[in-house]
Amino acid sequence: MKTLTVLELSKLYNINRQTIYNNIKKGILSKNSDNKIDLAEAIRVLGEPVKKQDVKEPVKIDSPNSAEVLLLRQQIDMLKNQLDDAKDRESFYQNQIEMMQRLLEAPKPNMTTFTDQEPVQSSMAKTDPEPDTAEAKHDGLTTPEQTENKRIPVPEHVEPEQPKRGWLSRFFLPNG
């Protein structure tokens, strides 16, 4: 029968070596004269060993081209994902553009633009009721001609500005 050391048994069952030593000390497991444990006794106490799946599936590398093909397929998948993302972005932005165009084309009630302000004011001036008498137009500050233009009259006689004087000239040349 096959015999195993404590280290081999711990690797086979994937348990700690101290657990095996404790089982030997308690009398659950027994050692041979050569300090090895019989496999049949280990199976009786611990059950069937866990089969290790250390063997990985072999990668078929028949030629260097297969690695290139795998790499190229990964790149194709990545590019497809990027293309899908770009299409999604494009449709989103196209929807945004269409929505903005609809908002720009829709007329807004009671809104005036800079070019529309002057006709609106002139139409408002026409809709106001005009007073019956000429005295109501003449308020004493402007002439009747100026009420139409709404300009402020500038006096024709303007006094010239006094020349600036220095600090000492204030004491020696009073009032001019």
Image (spheres, rainbow, N blue to C red):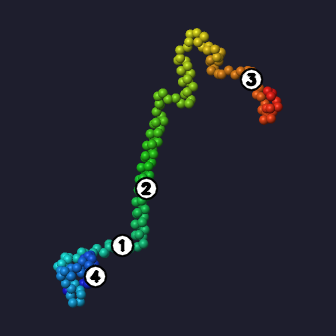
Mark 2 element type:
helix
Label 3, residues with CA under 10 Å away: few <14, some 14-19, many ≥20 = few
Kind of residue indicated by mark 3: Val
> Which tag is nearer the camera, tag 3 or tag 2?
3
117 above or below 58?
above
Q: Earlier in the sequence, mark 1 or mark 3?
A: 1
Quarter of the image where the C terminus is located: top right
> Which tag is nearer the camera, tag 4 or tag 1?
4
Q: Read off the residue under disc 2.
A: 82
Q: Earlier in the sequence, mark 3 or mark 2?
A: 2
C-alpha gap between disc 2 and disc 1: 29 Å
C-alpha gap between disc 4 and disc 1: 34 Å
Kind of residue indicated by mark 1: Lys
Q: Is residue 54 something that shows in the picture?
A: yes
Q: Position of residue 89 (x, y in %)?
A: 44, 49
Q: Earlier in the sequence, mark 2 or mark 4?
A: 4
Residue positioned 65% across, 17% down in the render: 142
Q: Earlier in the sequence, mark 4 or mark 1?
A: 4
Badge number at residue 60: 1
Quadrant for residue 161, please give it. top right
Q: Read off the residue under disc 3.
A: 158
Residue positioned 48% across, 36% down in the render: 104
Q: Read off the residue under disc 4.
A: 7
